[in-house]
Image (cartoon, helix red, strand yellow):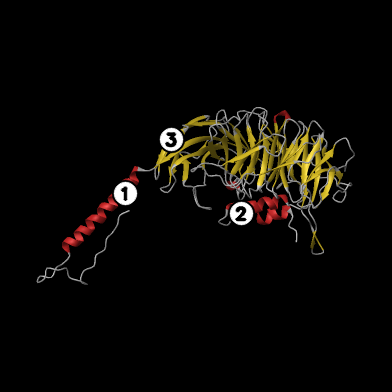
Amino acid sequence: MQRTLVDAIRNTQRFVEWTGTNRIGSLTASIILLTVILPISSYSVGVPLSRSIHFSSPVLYQGSPTQTSPYITTFPISQNSSDFVPFVLYPASNKTVWVVTIKQGNIINNVIQPPRAQIVKYTIGVGPKPVVSLVNAIPSDIVYDQTLNRVWFLENDSLAYYNQNAPPGNLTVELTFPKGSPQFMTIDPTGRIWLTLLGTNQIAEYDPSTREPPNLYNAPAPNASLQGITTAPDGTIWFAETAAKRLGHLTPCRSTSCTITDYGPPSGVEITFPIQLAIDRNGTVWFTDHGSNQFGSFNPSTLEWKVFPIGYCSASFADCAVGLPNAISLDSSGLIWFSEHYAGRVARYDPSDGTLIEYTVPAVTPPYIWWASPGPGNLVWFVAFGLGEIGYVNASLPVPISISATNSIELEQGGSKNVPASVQKPAGDSVYLSVSANGNDAPLGLSPLLYGSPEQGQIGPSDTAVSTAFRLSAAWNLGLGQRYAALTAYNSNVAINVFVHVNVSQGKTSYFSTGLATTILIGSVALYWRHTPKDRKTGRLRKNRVSATLVQSR
């Protein structure tokens, strides 16, 4: 019996992603549910796919756009839970975005109908226009090729495209990978398409200009659960080996003997489920960790890894604090954007000043911001499939709230320290303060071992510049090494964060406690032997007459 995507998400999202001791296994299962892999057994090149297409695509719900916050505008795609809902997208211009919409299979006569999907052209002022409909397919990725004017997407085991110059309903399956289960793709500067193949644990390279058979490269890690893939400025390819907790790197050579390797974090840096990645102008690899509340970076030149927690999440719906960062991209200014799946936010990180801004998508139920992508016009598009909407963040608008703080502290195990900070905001608005720390040190479901709280939780409307402090604390059993904590200032629209680098060292107090306990133990033993009664005649210790209790002070 088939489980459709939306049904799987709604009924198993928390269980699949956060239960069990094997977090990777559960999360890998989640990705499989999210992509609904339905293999195609035949190998074909350039063959029109007819059995999966319905040329009479239903018209999607066309509602009016809504400016839900000063920064966010949304566009309804569906009106009811049984309608097609947006899943992934790709901006083509400042007014047009290509969207994959999906629909769960309804139950008719006790039979679950197959899942359905659409390729939709959404234009501001015009609305959604479905151009292709699919049955038994949930495309996991979509990319618009500006050069060939094609809309590429992945469906089942195939790479397919829609030709904008052809009538609606036209679809060509360019290439099929038997049992390959392609997950994500990227187009390099030469026009070649690179794909991650989950089913065969391979990277595929395909050149649509020559249409020659693809080059296939085995991933360095076995059973890597390959996910995101992207092109670096130097033309090399990076990809996520999700189950292996590693990042892969391939240097193209137009043959099957290209150099391919991978990198994993050192001891003390923990990543759980790296899923998507992007490369900045300096060659630094940025990635999202979908198995935790963090995103991070890897510098191939220095081999330095950093992981940062997302900011404090204040929304009232369940799982807000879970976060689950997912899609990640760079905009034209070099800023890093990523979606926060469960937190319902679109985040922007500025590597130049270390500031993280998170834009909240207003909702009373989880919006599920699965996908986000910067586009032309300084608009960052996203899907909110929990709301049946797409939308964009207007990145041109300034955020009039700022926070600064001491950027580095030393913190002993079991110790606490105040971090001075200052917050600036416009008059008339209230701002709230909190702390977010990486919870990977703690066992699943327990509180973080690095934690904190603000000196004051709220800054009132009359204040515009406030000096305050945040108190950071380390549990006794927090591991040694370097971490980051986020100091958050937020309102109903945005959360602004700065990161404090925390170097955790072994507490001096722990040495004192251990020494004191040892001294008491030795002293107690000495006193016991000194005062144990002896037999007056023999001078020997009396047996079975005396018992002693040694108390060890912790």
Classed neighbour count for the residue bearing mark 3: other residues with Cα under 10 Å, few (<14), some (14–19), many (≥20): some
* Residue 150 horizontal side relative to residue 257, left or right: right
Residue 218 picture quarter: top right
Q: Which residue is mark 1?
A: 513
Classed neighbour count for the residue bearing mark 1: other residues with Cα under 10 Å, few (<14), some (14–19), many (≥20): few
Q: Which residue is mark 3?
A: 409
Nearer to the camera, 223 or 72: 223
* Residue 68 horizontal side relative to residue 293, left or right: right
Amino acid of disc 2: Gly
Image coordinates of residue 240 in percent, x first then y, are 63, 42
Residue 67 picture quarter: top right
Nearer to the camera, 156 or 469: 156
Residue 287 picture quarter: top right
Secondary structure of the residue carrying numbered label 3: strand
Classed neighbour count for the residue bearing mark 2: other residues with Cα under 10 Å, few (<14), some (14–19), many (≥20): some
Residue at 39 percent of width and 45 percent of height:
414
Q: Are marks 3 and 1 in contact (CB under 8 Å)?
A: no
